Every structure is written in C-alpha cells, then in structure tokens.
Image (spheres, rainbow, N blue to C red):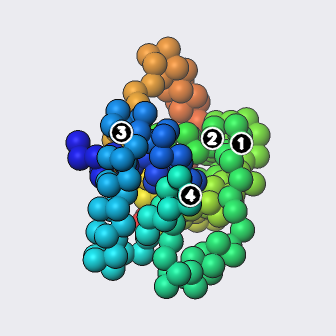
Amino acid sequence: MKVEAALEGILFTMGQSVERSTLAQALEISEEEVEQAALRLQEEYRRDERGIQLITLENRYQLCTKRDCYEPLVRLAARPRKPVLTNVMLETLAIIAYRQPVTKMEISRIRGVNSDHAVNRLVEYQLVCEAGRMDAPGRPILFVTTEEFLRRFQLSSAEELPDLKEEKLAEILEEVERETAQMPEEVEVSV
C-alpha cells in the first residue's frame, strides 16, 4: 500500500489531528517520510481541486474541509444530530430487516408491545421507509429497510444479513404460524 493512501486512511478515520511521530510509528517509516508523504497529499488535493485538504498544525496533520465547501457543510451540520439507536429501535429494525415488507401491527405483534414510536424514529433516521400499502382493511403501510440501513451496517443487500440460529428461527416460525392463523386468508401486498 502506498504511504499516501495509508496516511490518508488514518487521518480520515481519526477525524482529528495526529502527531507526525504517531503517524511514523503506525506507518513504520521515519518522520521525514511522513512529512514528504503529507506534502505529496497536500499537492494532490490542491491539483485535483478536491473538497478536502490536508493541513499541518505544528507537528500534527489533519484532513479537513476546504473553505469553499463551508456553506453546504454548515447547512448539513445545522440539522439535528441523530442519537444512537436504542435496544428497542435495534430490535424493531431487526424485525423489519428480516420480515420486510412488514406493517407496524406485525412488528408490534412480534415484539409484544406497541412499536409505533420505534418505527417512526427509524423512518426519521432514514433506516427504514414506507414501501407501499398492504391490500387489506385499513390499507396499513408497509416498511422496508433503506440504502442508509445497508450503508450503516456495511451490507450490499438485505440478502447479506446473517442467518438466524436454528433454534431462534424455529421460534420465529412458530410465532409467524400463530400470527398467520389470526390474519385474513388472502392478503395481497401492493407496492
């Protein structure tokens, strides 16, 4: 791997300034070689007119946004931050991921408690979205996972979700059978 690529990866991941000596240790090169790699990266960012730049802060380096990009960044940063997912939201998200498309009522039945709030928060966080309505009385909304879900959990598709353990799968299938017995005979899904 090129030193510049490794340096860039480290600085991007750290998100803050890193001392030259620390970088030299991590990259197993001298501090002078780190300085030369940093200079090459700085020139590359200038030449390619990128939105980021590599700055030097005494004996530290940091990747940051160029001033020309501040306005869109400020607009984005002004949006409220999303808190960490709670256990309730993670449980609800797992149900949606494995059973999609699924309604709030089905999620609540599986969880045993009302899940409206958790589903609404997941929609707000753009991890799930509406995918149409079920062709049943009341036409309940169907929910599926989004690209943001895939991105956050580093999946290419929902098919990459880990398989459930056999005993857990049997438990879920029993629950599905009980639910199915309570549902109308034919329910069509319209997306």
Find numbered disc 1 in the image and state the secondary structure of the residue it sits on: loop
3D distance between C-alphas at marks 2 and 1: 6 Å
Which is more N-terminal, label 3 or label 2?
A: 3
Relative horizontal placement of residue 16, taking residue 46 as reference (left or right): right
Q: Which residue is mark 1?
A: 86
| Label number found at residue 58 | 4
Front-lying residue, 54 or 151: 54
Looking at the rendered structure, the kind of residue marked 4 is Glu
Find numbered disc 3 in the image and state the secondary structure of the residue it sits on: loop
Looking at the rendered structure, the kind of residue marked 2 is Leu
Assess disc 3: are there few (<14), some (14-19) or many (≥20) residues with their C-alpha within 10 Å of its C-alpha. Answer: some
Which numbered mark, 1 or 3, is in the foreground of this view? Answer: 3
Q: Check the image and name the residue furthest to the top.
A: 167
Which is more N-terminal, label 4 or label 1?
A: 4
Which is more N-terminal, label 3 or label 1?
A: 3
Rendered location of residue 79, percent (x, y): 68, 73
User: Can you say whether 133 is above or below 11 in the image?
Assistant: below
Q: Which residue is mark 3?
A: 30
* Residues at discs 2 and 1 in contact (Cβ within 8 Å): yes
Q: Which residue is mark 2?
A: 90
